[in-house]
Image: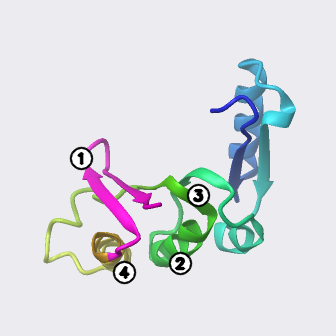
Amino acid sequence: MQAGGVLTSVDLEAEHQRLARETFTSAELAPQRFRLIAGAGLDVMPRLTDDGYDLVFLDGDKVEYGEYLEQAVRLVRPGGLIVFDNALWHDRVADPAQRDPETAAIRDVIKHVATDDRLRSVLLPLGDGLLVAQLLP
C-alpha cells in the first residue's frame, strides 16, 4: 500500500470487524490507514468514491456477484484490480451439471468479465479460485 493509502473493509459481521481492527492495531498500522465499515456490500458500495480504489476484493453473497462487479468497476481506478474470491466455488463452476443460483451467478460474472472490453482478466486456481480483472486505462 502506498504511503498515503487507506485500506477500506466492508463487512456485515461485527466479529470480523473486531478481529480486523485487532490485527491492524497489533501490526502497528496507524488508525488513519484503515477504515472498517459495518454493513452489506451493496448498501455501502454505492456510497464509496468513484475511481477511489486501486484494489477491490469481493467475497460476499455469490448471487450478488454481478451487482458487486458493477459497483467495483465504478470504484476502481483505471489500471486497478477487481478480485473475486471463490471463483471456482468448490469445483462446482467447472461442472455443467451444477445449476444452483450461486454457481450460476459466479459463471455469469466470469463470462461477463471475459467479454467486457474494459477489463483484462485471469482465473487463478488458487484455493477456491480467484477471478482477477484489471480495469484497462
Mark 4 against mark 3, which lies toward the viewer?
A: 3
| 3D distance between C-alphas at marks 1 and 4 | 21 Å
| 3D distance between C-alphas at marks 1 and 3 | 25 Å
| 3D distance between C-alphas at marks 4 and 3 | 30 Å
Which numbered circle lies on residue 52? none
Do the CB atoms of the residues marked 2 and 3 lie less than 8 Å apart? no
Left/right of residue 47 with respect to residue 32 in the rendered view? left
Mark 2 belongs to which amino acid?
Glu
Left/right of residue 94 with respect to residue 9 in the rendered view? left
Of the numbered discs 2 and 3, the one sitting upstream in the chain is 2
The residue tagged 4 is 101
Observer-nearest of 126 and 122: 122
Residue 93 x %, y %:
23, 67
Of the numbered discs 1 and 3, the one sitting upstream in the chain is 3
Disc 2 element? helix
Give the residue drawn at x 76%, y 50%.
Answer: 14
Mark 1 belongs to which amino acid?
Pro
The residue tagged 1 is 125
* Quadrant where the image shows the N terminus: top right
The residue tagged 2 is 67
Of the numbered discs 2 and 4, the one sitting upstream in the chain is 2
Residue 113 x %, y %:
35, 70
Question: What span is in magenta?
Answer: 116-137
Observer-nearest of 120 and 82: 120
For label 3, the crowd category at 10 Å Cα-Cα, with few meaning under 14, some 14 to 19 and many 20 or more, is many
Of the numbered discs 1 and 4, the one sitting upstream in the chain is 4
Mark 1 against mark 4, which lies toward the viewer?
A: 1
